[in-house]
Amino acid sequence: MEMTDNKKNAQAAAANQTGAGAGGFRQAQAWLHTWCGLWFSWLLFAVFLTGTLAVFEESITHWMTPEHHAEEAAQAQAPKGADLTQRLAWGLSYMAREHQGAEMWELWPADAQGGGRLTAYWFDGQREYAMQRLDNATGQPVDLPPSTVRQTLGGHHFVEFHHELHAGSWGLWIVGFATMAMLVALVSGIITHRRIFKDFFTFRSRKGQRSWLDAHNATGVLTLPFLFMIAFTGIVISGITFMPAPKISQYGLGEQAQQQFLRELDNPYLQQRSGEPLAVPDLEPFARKGQELMGQAVRAVVIYQPGESSARIGIYGWNSDAQATQRLSATSGMVMFSAATGEVLRVRLPGEVDGGVSSQAQSVMSGLHMVKFGGWAMKWLYFVCGLAGSALMATGSILFMVKRRSKHQGEFGAATARVYRLIEGLNVAAIAGLGVACIGYLWANRLVPVGIAHRDDWELAVFFGLWLLTLAHAQWVSPTVAWRQQLAALAALCLLLPLLSWLTMGKHLPAYMAEGDWESAGVELFCLASGLASVWALRGGRLGRKTTADKESRPACATQPADQAEAEVAA
């Protein structure tokens, strides 16, 4: 009898227990997958979608800077100018004359074909990167005319948001925590789903909750290796930030310590200043020798600590497109010389990395994460996997509320109904609202006046302003109305973007295609495809289905008693 009572007490205790401690190991993982996935899903969706768009950063920038097309065409028609020897001599003479005391001189003498621009760079007194263009036919400094290219971050906006949310180191840490949560959700999701690979081949359309679960499972299984790879490499390439203890123990804290760390990381061949004066020798023999040793045309010649016997001369090479598609590590070749003796201190072949195995591993991880290899085919593979991964996160957050529309689970006690309402609104703003903000950013590129000051900031303001408006809209109107109106806005903005571009730039989509400008055409074709997908979601999908939260969608309901609201949901 006593054992029976104990068993009943244990069952009662288990029945009353909630959270990660309820049930067995698999149930605990299900709890972890649900809540870890939910609270981070909105941020992860934004980071993942912008990262997916960032795969085509160059193409988006190309479309957003149409004035560049004419500049590139003019540059292609320009005379080739002087040869490499003369360009290096002009560059060295300019730096010795104008910036004798600079810590570093950097010359970009020509493009990979021996033509193009001649440019000198250096660190100024505030350690800011400064530059001067030199005429490639005379070697004289060129006063650049005011640029006619519109000021914009272009596709780099999506890279910055994906990497650090435009919030510096704080944003990087937030993205890092979210990425760790993503790994937790992935592992717990695998443990939770008994038939995960069988479920991959199962999709039951128009079955409500079951359809959302099937879509969540299918996109999860399809992209599982990609998701693990992209999350792991994303953490590794920022490992110095997330695990700073070794750096701090060696260099200490503060800005000076950080500069010393970066200096030694980037230039391990430097030595203490000697104080003995030594003029920088003729650069042409170093450039020729460097080309021969690394097997690449000269991209840059860098003189570290110029004017002293401790100076070093680094010759850096151009990566060809074919070479870049064949290597995971995107580093170019480099040869380092002693300026005083001409001794070769280091030969780094293309693809190799300075700093040993750990630096090599980080470089490979970076190449994997940023898809700097494999050409267009690999970019499209990453893009498709990125969209599927974004769909995984979106379906997960929607599934959470779909399950609770039919069965109120009371996780938040008296506040459950209000929290459900908040989650419904966040789902709309995070998914449809982010889409509106992204396409609005492209609209801003065509509508914000070209000559306006801080024009790139105005484009960013449109992006964040629209996103904030969609959040307020989703919390103000009912979830059903919010889904419908925001999807309709997204569809209209996407489908009308090519027309807007034609009206403002004078060139339409067929013209891009006829000229073979597939980067610009690709941006507009993707917008059209996104618009059609939004129309499908609006008309045939279930996002606009009436929800229980609609009952308390009006602002007045936010003040009604929680028990009354719960009663409505339960009904």
Image (cartoon, grey):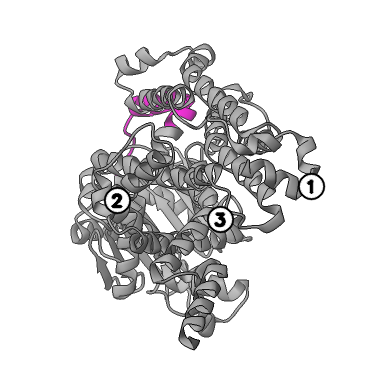
Range drawn in magenta: 62-83
Question: Dot 3 surroundings within 10 Å: few (below 14), some, or many (20 or more)?
Answer: some
Circle 2 residue: 221
* Residue hosting label 3: 39
Three-letter residue code for mark 2: Val
- Label 1 SS: loop
| Among the two numbered marks 1 and 3 on one chain, the one whose residue lies closer to the N terminus | 3
The residue at 41%/41% (across/down) is: 212
For the C terminus, give its image quadrant: top right
Of the residues under marks 2 and 3, which one precedes in the sequence?
Answer: 3
C-beta proximity under 8 Å, tags 1 and 2: no
User: Where residue 20 appears, x then y in whole percent?
Assistant: 51, 69
Q: Nearer the viewer, residue 524 or 331?
A: 524
Residue at x 52% of width, y 59% of height: 35
Which quarter of the picture shows residue 304?
bottom left
Disc ID at residue 561: 1
Nearer to us in this view, 272 or 142 = 272
